[in-house]
Amino acid sequence: MIVKISEIDNELIVKGKMEGSQLTMSDENEFCFLSPVDYSFAVRKFENLIRINGSMHCTINLICSRCLDEFVFPIDTYLDVEFSPKVLTPKVSELELKRNELDIYYYEGDEIDLDPLIYDEIVLNMPVRPLCEESCKGLCDACGKNKNYEECRCDKVSNTLLGEQLKSLLTK
């Protein structure tokens, strides 16, 4: 989504839906969009500073890190960023950022592309270790059956070389 700075008087309300395929930044995503991204942003202009804040919602498909089943995960998040013209960027090779400068982005020209920011906000709100549910039992180490659906009757104990070495250390 492109915001034209010249079209902003004081405040501009931007609402709509965006297909997730517009936001896909690479072919190797670990998720896919199940619904469009529903957004509502207020774009405010203060002299040289542009502030964009508002909410966005969508539903994505994730893979459980325990049982490898796909599940639906809702994303409800809030975007709050500021933009400053790139010409106002300090001309130093190294710059220490202060806390209030962490959410400032720089733009050139008359347009700001929000797609990368929306995508980043969605990724940042995804769980690091996605679980279909907190009580997920995962897969059997020996036979690979999903223990959420059927009880595993394996008598096999999966022994690894590392496991055997640890056992020998503990029995000494």
Image (spheres, grey):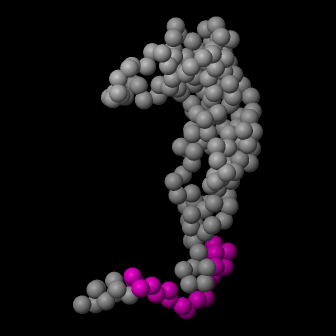
**Residue at (57, 71) in percent of width and height:** 137
Query: Residue 76, position in %: x, y?
Result: 62, 39
**Residue 122: image x %, image y %?**
60, 41
Foreground: 159 or 1?
1
Could you tell whether 105 is left or right of 9 in the image? left
In the rendered structure, does residue 50 fall within the stretch colored magenta? Answer: no
Q: Residue furthest left?
A: 172
- Can residue 24 be seen here? The reply is yes
Nearest the camera: 29 or 154?
29
Residue 82 shows in the view:
no
Q: Position of residue 103 (x, y in %)?
A: 47, 28
Compared to 116, does 112 lie above or below? above
Q: Residue at x 64, y 20 (%)?
A: 111
**Displayed quadrant of residue 64:** bottom right
Residue sitting nearer the eye, 74 or 12: 12
**Which quadrant holds the C terminus?**
bottom left
Determine the main secondary structure of the stretch shown in magenta. Answer: loop
Q: Could you say where residue 116 lies in the image, as x and y percent from the top left?
A: 60, 35
Q: Quadrant of the N terminus?
A: top right
Give the extent of the magenta segment: 145-163
Q: Is 111 left, or right, of 48 in this rendering?
A: right
91 on left or right of 70: left
Q: Is residue 157 magenta?
A: yes
